[in-house]
């Protein structure tokens, strides 16, 4: 048990499974004592077992409702996207980045890639990965495409989004992501580079556009996110 407590994810999952099953087993000892030939008793046993094994699938509380929020953004293919509206019906794994980030954002993006690669083809159904830049003055659709290409990302269900600065600033406020401009520099070619102090986050949003969980993006546990996606789906 000590080794389990050292791994809180496994420990919490075990508690989640074991606690309701103990209660249900006590009840089942009475149910199974009934006449096995009675059809209703068999149906009741099946019903109770179904509840017992699905009770752990609803352990992700609704943190915030995004269903009434909509922002017109542009994706990495320069197409207009309504965020969040266009992604209703998808389980969203969202990261918040800027492409010139030297540390946190590459780690966050890589963790999202690992989640994508860990999911099976079946588990991948209705899952959408979204990376949103909070540096839209620099992160054009072309820049976002290059960012993805350099990392050899699978864009079949992964979208990069940008937009006008006022719209992006408002969106970041709504999702609770803070991005403070720390410094800027100009390269010899005249290109402006911004550096931000920002929230380190990956968000899990359900098919009804409700926030279910936030993770520390650069340090996220891959299997935890995979398990949470499967719990929602």
Image (cartoon, rainbow, N blue to C red):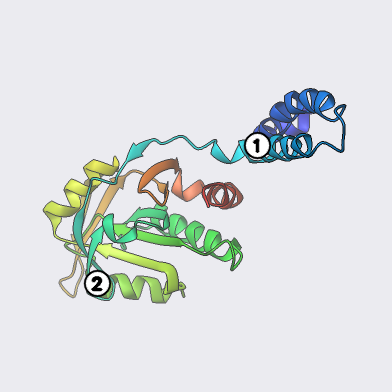
Instruction: Specify the label residue 141 is tagged with.
Output: 2
Between label 1 and label 2, give the one nearer the viewer.
1
Which residue occupies the foreground of this view, 126 or 118?
126
Residue 173 higher or lower than 163, as above or below? above
Residue corresponding to mark 1: 51
Q: Secondary structure at mark 1?
A: helix
Quadrant in the rendering for residue 15: top right
Which residue occupies the foreground of this view, 107 or 60?
60
Residue located 18% across and 61% down the image: 163
Query: What x and y, as percent, mark residue 18?
Result: 73, 31
Determine crowd level at label 2: few under 14, some 14-19, many 20+ residues with C-alpha closer than 10 A.
many
Which residue occupies the foreground of this view, 228 or 133?
228
How many numbered callouts? Answer: 2
Which residue occupies the foreground of this view, 172 or 229?
229
Determine crowd level at label 1: few under 14, some 14-19, many 20+ residues with C-alpha closer than 10 A.
few
Query: What x and y, as percent, mark residue 95?
Result: 38, 54
Q: Is residue 178 visible?
A: no
Quadrant in the rendering for residue 175: top left
Q: For marks 1 and 2, give the CA distance.
A: 47 Å
Q: Secondary structure at mark 2?
A: helix
């Amino acid at each position: 048990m000590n080794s389990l407590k050292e791994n809180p994810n496994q420990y919490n999952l075990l508690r989640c499974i074991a606690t309701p099953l103990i209660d249900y087993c006590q009840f089942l000892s009475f149910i199974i004592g009934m006449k096995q030939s009675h059809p209703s008793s068999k149906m009741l046993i099946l019903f109770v077992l179904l509840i017992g094994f699905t009770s752990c699938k609803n352990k992700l509380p609704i943190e915030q409702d995004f269903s009434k929020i909509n922002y017109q953004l542009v994706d990495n293919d320069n197409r207009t996207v309504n965020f969040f509206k266009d992604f209703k019906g998808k389980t969203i794994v969202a990261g918040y980045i800027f492409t010139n980030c030297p540390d946190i954002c590459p780690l966050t993006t890589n963790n999202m890639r690992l989640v994508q690669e860990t999911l099976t083809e079946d588990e991948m159904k209705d899952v959408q990965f979204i990376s949103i830049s909070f540096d839209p003055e620099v992160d054009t659709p072309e820049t976002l495409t290059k960012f993805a290409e350099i990392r050899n990302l699978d864009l079949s269900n992964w979208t990069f989004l940008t937009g006008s600065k006022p719209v992006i600033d408002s969106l970041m406020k709504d999702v609770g992501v803070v991005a403070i401009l720390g410094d800027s520099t100009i390269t010899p070619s005249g290109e402006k580079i911004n550096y931000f102090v920002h929230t380190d986050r990956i968000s899990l949003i359900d098919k009804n556009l409700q926030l279910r969980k936030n993770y520390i993006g650069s340090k996220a546990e891959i299997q935890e996110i995979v398990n949470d996606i499967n719990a929602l789906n």
